[in-house]
Image: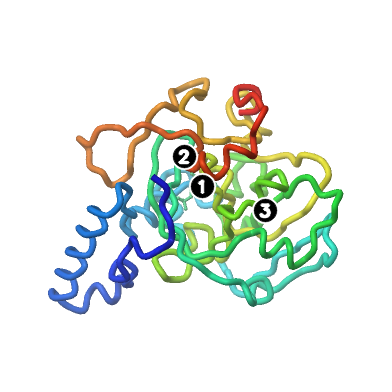
Amino acid sequence: MRLTWSDVTPKALFMSRRQWMTGAASIAALAAASRAAQAAVEDVPNSFEDITRYNNFYEFGYDKEDPYRNAGQLTIDPWAVVIDGLVEQPGTYDLADVLAGQPTEERIYRLRCVEGWSMVIPWLGFELGHLLRRVGVQPAAKFVAFETLLRPAEMPGQRTGLLDWPYREGLRIDEAMHPLTILASGLYGEELPRQNGAPLRLVVPWKYGFKSIKSIVRITLTEEMPPTTWNMMQPREYGFYANVNPKVDHPRWSQASERRIGAGFFAPRIPTQMFNGYAEEVADLYAGMDLRVNY
Ligand code: MTE
């Protein structure tokens, strides 16, 4: 089932944790609202705790709780994003300029990590296509490359050789312009926490989570397929496309099912869906391609 950003999630779920503390009555209301949401959709958003304490953000360490523990020190104001390459208006844009005039929406998306776990996350964001159209895409642009901030002084993981820094990702231009592809600047109705990629991160819900690059400082439109972090490190294990596909296993584990974070220790694994359940929207992008070759 396709999740939308409509009102399937009651507003009560967007209450901040501060508001959570305002009394038993509101907690009871929240619990009721949460049960209603559960009945209304099969995929219920994960708790704020799950989403912000179980993360992959190797710039802040290797363990799932390291980003929660270490990301607090990251300076996100001021923040600028370089947009360059094959665009009509290249430049260094202040975050405020990037966000200006963008229609921010709530989008509840499944996130499926290549490691075999998943979550459901209520993002706040806007379509990447809106931004790209605003800066003007030149006809020769075939790909979009993204880069994360490189700042070892504040990102302890970057003082190790864990990955080839800065973290880099890329999309084909039609994937980047697809209306499901967003830049997120918030979740649960609040500013994006640093461990989730503040102040601005990509979310591509039909691809494995590693494509959804965090804390972006550069967006470059190119003619050539750009190098990407995990693909450079292990090309046999991590392709450029990285579309969620239960039929194409990772060389070291099956991708047929996933563990929903927060579901409890005894919860059965759930079947992974083609394109993470977004096939209706995106399968056309790959018509005629062999998804075993272009994994
Ligand atoms: N972006 C950067 N810069 N560094 C990372 O280590 N990890 C990726 C992706 N984006 C990562 C990143 C991986 S593997 C996943 S699964 C998602 O972020 C996790 O996003 P979340 O922590 O917000 O759930």
Q: Nearer the viewer, residue 295 or 137?
A: 137
Work out how far the residue at label 2 is from the one at label 1, CA to CA, in angstroms: 7 Å
Compare marks 2 and 1 and give the one earlier in the sequence.
1
Q: Name which residue type carries label 3.
A: Met
Q: Name which residue type carries label 2.
A: Asn
Compare marks 2 and 3 and give the one earlier in the sequence.
3
* Residue 234 in which image quadrant: top right
Q: Nearer the viewer, residue 164 or 33?
A: 33
Which residue is tagged 3? 177
Count of marks placed on residues? 3
Q: What residue appears at the point 66 percent right and 64 percent down from the top-left corner?
A: 130
Label 2 sits on a secondary structure element that is helix
Q: Name which residue type carries label 1.
A: Pro
Work out how far the residue at label 2 is from the one at label 3, CA to CA, in angstroms: 19 Å
* Residue 99 in which image quadrant: bottom right
Decide if residue 205 is on the left or right side of residue 173.
left
Question: Would you place residue 158 above or below residue 245 in this image?
Answer: below
Indicate the position of residue 140 as horizontal and vertical percent values.
86, 49
Which residue is tagged 1? 205
Work out how far the residue at label 1 is from the one at label 3, CA to CA, in angstroms: 14 Å
Decide if residue 28 is on the left or right side of residue 173.
left
Cβ of mark 1 under 8 Å from ligand 1: the answer is no
**Mark 1 or 3: the one toward you:** 3
Label 1 sits on a secondary structure element that is loop
Residue contact at pointers 2 and 1, CB within 8 angstroms: yes
Q: What residue appears at the point 18 percent right and 74 percent down from the top-left corner?
A: 26
Which residue is tagged 2? 276
